[in-house]
Image (cartoon, rainbow, N blue to C red):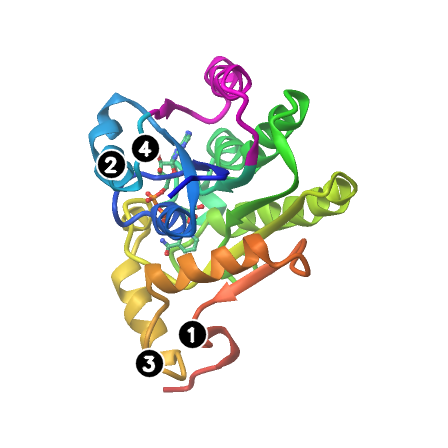
Amino acid sequence: MARRKNALVIGIANESSISAAIAKELYENGYNIIPTYLNERALAHVKKVTDQLGVETLFPFQAGDEKQLQDITDYLNENDIKIDVFVHGIAFASEIKKNLHEVSWTSFKEAVKVSAFSMVEITRKLIEEDVLNPDSSILTISYRGSQVAVEGYNMMGPVKNILEALVRGLASELGGKGIRVNAVSPGPVMTRAASGINGFSSLIEAVKKTSPIGRTASLEDIGRMSYEMIHNPSINGTVYLVDCGESVVFSVK
Ligand SMILES: NC(=O)c1ccc[n+]([C@@H]2O[C@H](COP(=O)([O-])OP(=O)(O)OC[C@H]3O[C@@H](n4cnc5c(N)ncnc54)[C@H](O)[C@@H]3O)[C@@H](O)[C@H]2O)c1
């Protein structure tokens, strides 16, 4: 298949990553995937995913590393590649196991930088270097802990709230350039990042019990809805829940 569109996907750690599911859906629909990896230790795990997506070139990327970001945009410019989709699927919080009121400013600041503001920094660079196609789409990944205080989610709730506000702000500013910005907000999925959250297995079980249909969203569900959000021109500046209805129920069981 001739791959006509390009997706920059930042956030694949391994086969369980939500970004991997989104990249897979994009690949199956004809996209050329341009992925990044966190560091050399992560590379083999990322390659297990990207080898199945016909990827030959991967880029190291740590949030805030301007040189690495420059290398990505240099590659795009040198190869005359324009990005149609930017998937921002990264998050980090060093003090995620602490209660919110015990978290240091240093850790909170770093979490905002990696998990939220990096979307702005990368977007700005893509625009400055003129490597975003008109009608391009940016998708990040949020969680409902932005709206309610989910036990164990601690400092990431406020960080996701900031991320969602950035989605609205960017969507408002970039619409004139033909760029849409959204966040998909899935229910809990056991991933590498999620495994660092206290009580995450119990959260999954509780959500299954609360959900009217007795299940959580699968990676495939999330990949498919992400694809729709990326492509449907009427969806812009939104945070869309992919949670099997869990959030509309107040359970007394
Ligand atoms: N797993 C869930 O239940 C769930 C639910 C809702 C939202 N999310 C969000 O989905 C996104 C993806 O997480 P995931 O659950 O797929 O886990 P994951 O561990 O597969 O992905 C997290 C990614 O963040 C990257 N990352 C961490 N620190 C980084 C840094 N400093 N610079 C660059 N990259 C960095 C990691 O390398 C990894 O690829 C996150 O934003 C997460 O908050 C997850």
User: Which residue is disc 3 drawn over?
Assistant: 214
Mark 4 crowdedness (10 Å alpha carbons): few <14, some 14-19, many ≥20 = some
User: Which residue is disc 2 drawn over?
Assistant: 51
Please provide the residue range marked out in magenta: 57-83
Separation of disc 2 and disc 4 at Cα? 6 Å
Separation of disc 3 and disc 2 at Cα? 34 Å
Of the pair 76 and 149, the residue shown nearer to us? 76
The amino acid type found where label 1 is placed reads Cys
Of the pair 28 and 156, the residue shown nearer to us? 28
The amino acid type found where label 2 is placed reads Asp
- For marks 3 and 2 on the same chain, the one whose residue lies earlier in the sequence: 2
- For marks 1 and 2 on the same chain, the one whose residue lies earlier in the sequence: 2
Mark 2 crowdedness (10 Å alpha carbons): few <14, some 14-19, many ≥20 = few
On residue 55, the disc is 4
Q: Are marks 2 and 4 in contact (CB under 8 Å)?
A: yes
Element under disc 2: helix
Residue shown at 62% from the left, 32% from the top? 132
Separation of disc 1 and disc 2 at Cα? 31 Å
Quarter occupied by residue 151: bottom left
- For marks 1 and 4 on the same chain, the one whose residue lies earlier in the sequence: 4
